[in-house]
Image (cartoon, helix red, strand yellow):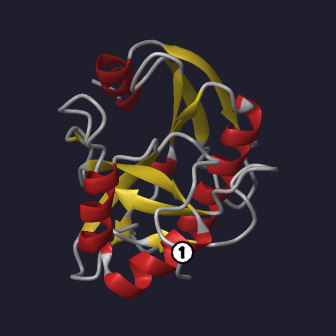
Amino acid sequence: MTIIEHLERHLGPIAEGWGTPISSDDQSRVRIVRFSNVPYDGAMTFCTVGHSDHVAEMDDGRTVRQELLFSTAGSYPADQVASFLLTLSSYLRSRTKALLRGEVIGPSAPVIPGVAANAVYASMPVIFPQGLEVYSESVPSTVLVWLVPLSASEAGFVRKEGWSRFEDLLEERNPDLLDLDRPSLVTIS
């Protein structure tokens, strides 16, 4: 089974996709695919394909392959979300380190123009069907990382208080994590 077959098995058929040109110094190509009505009706889920061509190192020296998942409400421009994910993938591949659970990237510019979310949080893909989280037919295995959009104050909270405390807050408040303009759960930065 290919990574695309794995994704379609758990997320349904690919609705559309985007790619980057192959550069002369890097023969791998990252693409973005979009799935409709996943994880629920009216939502869109985007996933990198090819990010996992890069083997990343974890803090303990083990290696892993990763693909990135990002979901939004269906009202956001798909082209802009795909562009954001391609840019983030390029950044993550350049640093060679694996994206770890609880890690925050940002804050920076909004993930797409005009929205409040300007950071992302690496999480396990708990809102998706069980079995999606690991593609075991690659060596090393490919882990799918769900990128949760955050505000700057939430990014600061995770860094200060830790990811476990932030996940407790998510469970307690149950915010719409696919709304890129949702109010922040915290007011500190």
Q: Residues within 10 Å of mark 1 (few under 14, many from 20)?
A: few
Q: How many marks?
A: 1
Quarter-of-image position of residue 170:
bottom left
User: Label 1, on which residue?
Assistant: 187
In percent of the image, x 38 and y 69: which residue is there?
98
Foreground residue, 15 or 41? 41
Image x and y of residue 150, in percent? 53, 60
Above or below for 29 versus 111? above
Above or below for 35 versus 155? above
Foreground residue, 163 or 142? 163
Q: Is residue 101 visible?
A: no
In percent of the image, x 68 and y 26: which residue is there?
75
Image x and y of residue 176, in percent? 46, 41
Quarter-of-image position of residue 131:
top left
Callout 1: SS: loop
Image x and y of residue 135, in percent? 25, 39
In percent of the image, x 24 and y 80: which residue is there?
61
Direction bottom: furthest residue = 160
Q: Is residue 76 visible?
A: yes
Quarter-of-image position of residue 108:
bottom right
Foreground residue, 70 or 186? 186
Image x and y of residue 47, in percent? 50, 37
The image quadrant where one finds the C terminus is bottom right
The image quadrant where one finds the N terminus is top left
Q: Is residue 81 left or right of residue 177?
A: right
Foreground residue, 179 or 133? 179
Residue type beneath disc 1 = Thr
Direction right: furthest residue = 113
Above or below for 129 versus 162? above
Q: Is residue 108 left or right of residue 131?
A: right
Above or below for 41 versus 141? above
